[in-house]
Image (spheres, grey):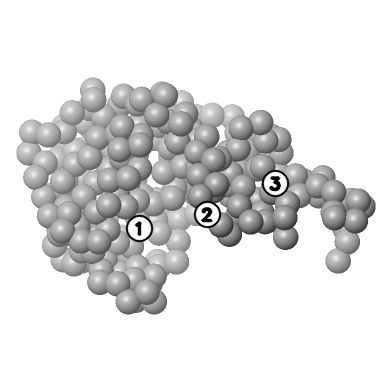
Amino acid sequence: DYAFVSGTSWTNNPRFSRAATKIPAHSFDYEKYLQLRMLPEDHGYDYAVYLDEDIADHEDNAEMGLKAPVSAHRFFGSLAKFFDEFEAVSHIPIVIAGYPSERSDRSRHFGGRKLIYGETAQLIRNANVVFAHASTAISYAVLWRRPLVFLTSNEMTNSWYQPWIEAPCRILKSPILNIDDVSGKIDMVKWQEIDQASYSRYEHAYIKSEGSPEKSLWDIFLSVNTDSGSRIQPGCD
């Protein structure tokens, strides 16, 4: 009956296009962005953030019968070497935005680096650069206009997951790096640039409908007339 729609990409999805009432709004990431936007911004930018996806053991892979795109031993070994080289070249520490549903001893994968849960949006807001694969949290980097570098590996390149990395990478015109081949390829000047037009296009396609109200999804929903012409009232069961 009702479809919240964000951006323009939904128009090709019949689940949304067939809805009786379409409500131009925004994604849940934008909802979080609205909340944080009211808080004072810290302009430190003295760290980089890696968006952990539990890439080797993600529960969705097992549920969907998909092979893990990487093996834990090879992937985290290469990731650690990349982190070490990046920190040596940039003199900027890497902080890990931990994947929320798996917290058992994950710090061992990241060489003892600071691992923070539940603050991904805040970490991205104040980061010097954001390292990602295909996490939906890249939306925060787009909204805060933070530089993105997409990471892959030899294993990942040959897996079903690679196109999921390449798609946002192409749209945002961001660099991509194979963590199995990083020697001499860390370019802090290039990595701190963003394509403003591409970020804006991504936001308008996937995150927020043009002209939608700058208020909570639920406030938007409550303001929509029902088919009977009455309004949904706050506080109703």
Question: Quick one: 65 or 229, which is closer to the camera?
Answer: 229
Give the amino acid at mark 3: Ile
**Residue 51 in view, yes or no:** yes
Q: Earlier in the sequence, mark 1 or mark 2?
A: 2
Residue 192 image point, x, y percent: 30, 26
Residue sitting at 41 percent across and 43 percent down? 138
Q: Secondary structure at mark 1?
A: loop
> What numbered label is drawn on residue 23?
3
How far apart marks 3 and 1 lie (CA) works out to 31 Å
Residue 221, compared with residue 63, is above or below; it is above
Q: Write down the residue under mark 2.
A: 13
Residue 38 image point, x, y percent: 64, 33
Residue 116, compared with residue 24, is above or below; it is below
**Crowding near the residue tagged with mark 2, few <14, some 14–19, many ≥20 C-alpha atoms within 10 Å:** few
Nearer the observer, disc 1 or disc 2?
A: 2
Q: Write down the residue under mark 1.
A: 53
Q: Secondary structure at mark 2?
A: loop
Residue sitting at 39 percent across and 70 percent down? 60
How far apart marks 2 and 3 lie (CA) works out to 15 Å
How far apart marks 1 and 2 lie (CA) works out to 26 Å
Residue sitting at 29 percent across and 61 percent down? 55
Question: Quick one: 59 or 23, which is closer to the camera?
Answer: 23
